Amino acid sequence: MEERYDVTIIGGGPAGMFAAFYCGLHQLKAQLIEALPQLGGQPAALYPEKRVWDVAGKAGVTGQELADDLAAQIEVAPVDQFLGEKVTDVVKEDDGSFTIHSAKRKSTSKSIVIAMGNGAFSPRKLALPGAEELEGKQVRYFANHKEDFKDQRVAVLGGGDAAIDMALMLEDVAEQVYLVHRRDAFRALEHTVAQLEASTIEKLTPYLPKDLTVNADQSVTLNLKKMRADEERPLEVDKVLVNYGFTSNNAALRDWSLDLASERGQIKVDQTMKTSVPGVYAIGDGVVYEGKVALIATGFGEAPTAITNLAKELYPDKRMATHSSSMGIG
């Protein structure tokens, strides 16, 4: 038997999680589908221990703390959650409902909320022989838990804000942090660079990794080549943390059987978060409308707007509370 839902939310980042919470408050039968194996989206995956400051009422909150708080909020009014499940197609049926396909299952829904941000994202990989086999062990692309690097020698590869943030984050737990960048100058905010200059992080510039080998004690020797020179130097570390940036796109949407109006690769919505396809709403960084500001806080406002309006469409005779104070929760 296929599960039938009132609402299917596709995307488990902050906006999608808050939308799921509002579905629960409105007592809508809802499912939340996320392609990653955990909720929280890019903040939790890319900067779990870095503080963000654009969330109202939070005087600095890490990506992981934000995800944990949102997950706890959903538990007040739970909805079905399916993680590690990529949606491969959404088909609008003749009766106005939708069939949602993934590699694992098929379900039906009266409405859809797309909360996929800028789409699936993946790190730019370290293009060295043997690096792929070491992923998740000596070679990492995410620093989800600082304790994984405790008392270790860590080489952070990259020269942007995120790379420097990672290096600074690990400074107080690692034995030594090295920052390897192919230029002498860093592509980061002046404040961030000033923090780097005042730290104990050893800067190795302008160098580029040439090859790596695994030693008998499972440490790694990175052979670094100086740019525009023949000079090379070995660097022995326990972990290599790569931050060459990330690629993201909403290519998956183009494979769906929905003809969504878009602008510059983003989904066009109206003031109620409706798309050009009746029954489909969209929220978060992946949508565009006049005056749109791409912030987490903005997505938090768009989520209840979308859910409240679609709930009124689904159940026009049902009284829909707007404020949580009138929804009967303690």
Image: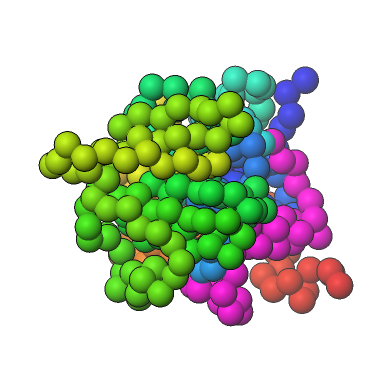
Q: Does residue 262 lie above or below 318 as drawn? A: above
* Image coords of residue 135 (percent x, y): 53, 31
Residue 77: give x, y in percent of width and height: 79, 56
Q: Nearer the viewer, residue 232 or 159?
A: 232
Please tell me whether residue 135 belongs to the stretch shown in magenta. Answer: no
Asked which quadrant contains residue 320, the reply is bottom right
x 58%, y 37%: residue: 36
Q: What coloring was used for the rendering? A: rainbow
Quarter of the rendering occupied by the N terminus: top right
Q: In this view, does 114 lie to the left or right of 103?
A: left
**Image quarter of the C terminus:** bottom right
Q: Confirm whether the magenta stretch covers residue 81.
A: yes
Q: In this view, does 28 lie to the left or right of 247?
A: right
Residue 247, image x, y percentages: 36, 40
Asked which quadrant contains residue 242, the reply is top left
Residue placed at 76% from the left, 59% from the top?
Answer: 72
Could one spot residue 227 in this view of the protein? yes
Q: Give the range drawn in magenta.
A: 53-82
Q: Tell me which residue sits at (36%, 71%) in the image.
A: 197
* In the image, residue 271 above or below residue 4: below
